[in-house]
Image (cartoon, rainbow, N blue to C red):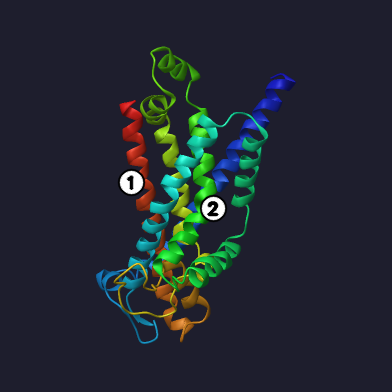
């Protein structure tokens, strides 16, 4: 074996070991949560209200609250993010404005989530008078994941072969028609990657909802978008740090974590299925 081949073999094996370590860590975390949480998860746990200071009963209000926040934030962030990505990539020329918008989008993605929570409280809760509500929490979470969707959309559009655009223009199509009928259908499966990443982040965030929507203990379901709700990540935080009986509620905490992971996994698999289906249709 030559020196170059030896170096290459060492490098590839190092990459392989690091990749396997990452996968192993993921399975260790999942296994730990499953082992400790599976005993708490049953039909009553999933469909009943919390009782006795959250040491008994279920997590139905937190499940419904989390679903409301994920749906609300995606309804706001996904169309706005995709349209912004289309505008930046398809309509803006390589000018200072385009570089500035990209730079600001990247900077927005790096802002800590707690800052989004404070901003959401100042704007949506206090200034717009939404109060602690689903709409205030959803808009705050939507703003937080907006840069991810914009950047993912832009990268997906960049990956589309320019020959498709040129061919469409050569046939007399307008720019809008080319984007709608030629570019977007090709890029859409990759655009869904931004949706997957956003759902995962929104589902697990605690800081932004702390100031805008999350309730410590609210054993009822919301009736409108202006109601306050419980949410799984904040409920998990409360059970493990400031519950009425932390030791007694610990199995519920692990069960809550398991349900949260399962919800994110189901959402990701659903979007992945849609992405694969659209890719096969291209």
* Front position in the image: 265 or 29: 265
Q: Answer whether residue 13 is visible to the viewer in this image.
A: yes
Q: Is residue 219 left or right of residue 27?
A: left
x, y percentage for residue 96? 67, 35
> In this view of the protein, can residue 36 be seen by the observer?
no
The residue that appears at 67% across and 31% down in the rendered structure is: 10
Q: Position of residue 60 (x, y in %)?
A: 31, 71
Circle 2 Cα neighbour tier, 10 Å, few/some/many (<14 / 14–19 / ≥20):
few
- Quarter of the figure that contains the N terminus: top right
Identify the residue at the far top of this view: 170
From the top left corner, tell me how far across and down residue 34 is, in percent.
Answer: 40, 62
At mark 1, the secondary structure is: helix
User: Image point 43% across, 31% down: which residue?
Assistant: 187
User: In this rendering, is residue 4 above or below 241?
Assistant: above
Which residue is at a point 40% across and 31% down the rendered structure image?
184
Q: Residue at x 47, y 45 (%)?
A: 81
Dividing the picture into quadrants, the one containing residue 73 is: bottom left
Residue 251 is marked as: none
List the single residue furthest toward the right: 3
Q: Nearer the viewer, residue 235 or 98?
A: 98
Q: Please give the residue where the numbered disc 1 appears in the rendered image.
A: 270
Quadrant into which the C terminus falls: top left
- Residue 25 got which mark? 2
Q: Report which quarter residue 113 is drawn in.
A: bottom right
């Amino acid at each position: 074996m030559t020196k170059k081949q030896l170096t290459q073999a060492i490098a590839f094996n190092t990459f392989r070991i690091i990749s396997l370590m990452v996968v192993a860590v993921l399975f260790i975390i999942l296994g730990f949560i499953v082992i400790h949480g599976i005993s708490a998860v049953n039909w009553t746990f999933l469909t009943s209200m919390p009782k006795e200071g959250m040491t008994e009963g279920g997590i139905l209000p937190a499940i419904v609250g989390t679903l409301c926040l994920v749906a609300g934030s995606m309804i706001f962030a996904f169309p706005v993010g995709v349209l912004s990505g289309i505008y930046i990539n398809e309509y803006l020329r390589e000018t200072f404005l385009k570089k500035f918008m990209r730079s600001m989008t990247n900077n927005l993605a790096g802002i800590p989530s707690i800052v989004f929570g404070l901003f959401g409280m100042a704007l949506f809760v206090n200034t717009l008078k939404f109060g602690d509500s689903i709409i205030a929490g959803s808009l705050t979470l939507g703003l937080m994941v907006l840069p991810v969707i914009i950047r993912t959309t832009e990268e997906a559009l960049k990956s589309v072969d320019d020959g498709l655009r040129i061919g469409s223009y050569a046939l007399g199509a307008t720019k809008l028609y080319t984007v709608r009928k030629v570019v977007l259908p090709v890029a859409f499966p990759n655009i869904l990657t931004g949706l997957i990443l956003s759902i995962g982040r929104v589902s697990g965030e605690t800081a932004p909802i702390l100031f805008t929507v999350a309730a410590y203990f609210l054993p009822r379901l919301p009736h409108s978008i202006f109601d306050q709700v419980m949410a799984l990540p904040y409920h998990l935080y409360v059970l493990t740090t400031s519950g009425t009986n932390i030791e007694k509620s610990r199995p519920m905490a692990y069960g809550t974590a398991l349900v949260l992971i399962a919800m994110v996994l189901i959402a990701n698999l659903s979007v992945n299925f849609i992405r694969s289906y659209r890719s096969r249709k291209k």
